[in-house]
């Protein structure tokens, strides 16, 4: 009768399953030393770039006559506008906090009130600018 060679196609227990032991080899990271990934995955674009991208796509879809696709892209534009405005607002708040923390505290309460008034005016100006940009984009898309 035919006899199999011992050790070939033998069932291994869980302790000796393939891939369990690395025999002194360490697993390589998924990125090169220059920051590029090994699998070709591109990192996500910034919200500002995505805002421009979807705005252009919305205009293109509208010019081709597809109003539904254009509205879809405009929803993306709205989403990324909110992200960019929130990011800008947070950056401005952080800058104002840094400048106020580096300055020596003045005992004169009127100067502190003036600083707060300037900060609120800056925030209001940014909100008005954001609203103007949104209305301009909506007008250009409608054309």
Image (spheres, rainbow, N blue to C red):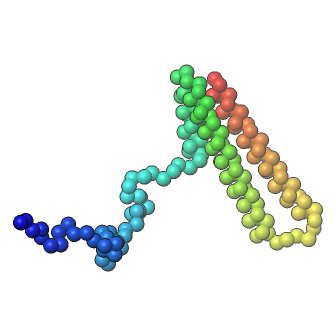
Evaluate whether residue 70 shows in this view: yes
Q: In the image, is 78 to the left or to the right of 42?
A: right
> Which of the 4 image quadrants contains residue 90?
bottom right
Q: Nearer the viewer, residue 5 or 85?
A: 5
The residue furthest bottom is: 24
Q: Nearer the viewer, residue 65 or 53?
A: 65
Evaluate whether residue 25 shows in this view: no
Q: In the image, is 62 to the left or to the right of 102?
A: left
* Vertical side of 70 occupied by 98: above or below: below
Residue at 93 percent across and 65 percent down: it is 109
Residue at 70 percent across and 50 percent down: it is 86
Indicate the quadrant containing the C terminus: top left, top right, bottom left or bottom right.
top right
Q: In the image, is 139 to the left or to the right of 111?
A: left
Indicate the quadrant containing the N terminus: top left, top right, bottom left or bottom right.
bottom left
Q: Nearer the viewer, residue 138 or 29?
A: 29
Pinpoint residue 69: horizontal percent, then vertical percent. 56, 29
* Vertical side of 76 occupied by 60: above or below: above
Pinpoint residue 41: horizontal percent, then vertical percent. 43, 52
The residue furthest front is: 1
């Amino acid at each position: 009768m035919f006899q199999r060679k011992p050790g070939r196609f033998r069932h291994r227990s869980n302790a000796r399953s393939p891939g369990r032991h690395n025999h002194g080899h360490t697993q390589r990271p998924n990125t090169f030393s220059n920051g590029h990934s090994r699998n070709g995955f591109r990192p996500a674009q910034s919200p500002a770039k995505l805002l421009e991208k979807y705005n252009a796509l919305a205009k293109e879809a509208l010019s081709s006559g597809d109003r539904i696709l254009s509205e879809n892209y405009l929803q993306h534009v709205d989403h990324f506008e909110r992200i960019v405005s929130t990011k800008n607002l947070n950056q401005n708040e952080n800058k104002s906090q840094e400048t106020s923390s580096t300055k020596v505290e003045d005992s004169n309460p009127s100067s502190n009130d003036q600083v707060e008034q300037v900060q609120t005016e800056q925030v209001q100006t940014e909100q008005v600018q954001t609203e103007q940009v949104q209305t301009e984009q909506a007008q250009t898309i409608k054309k």
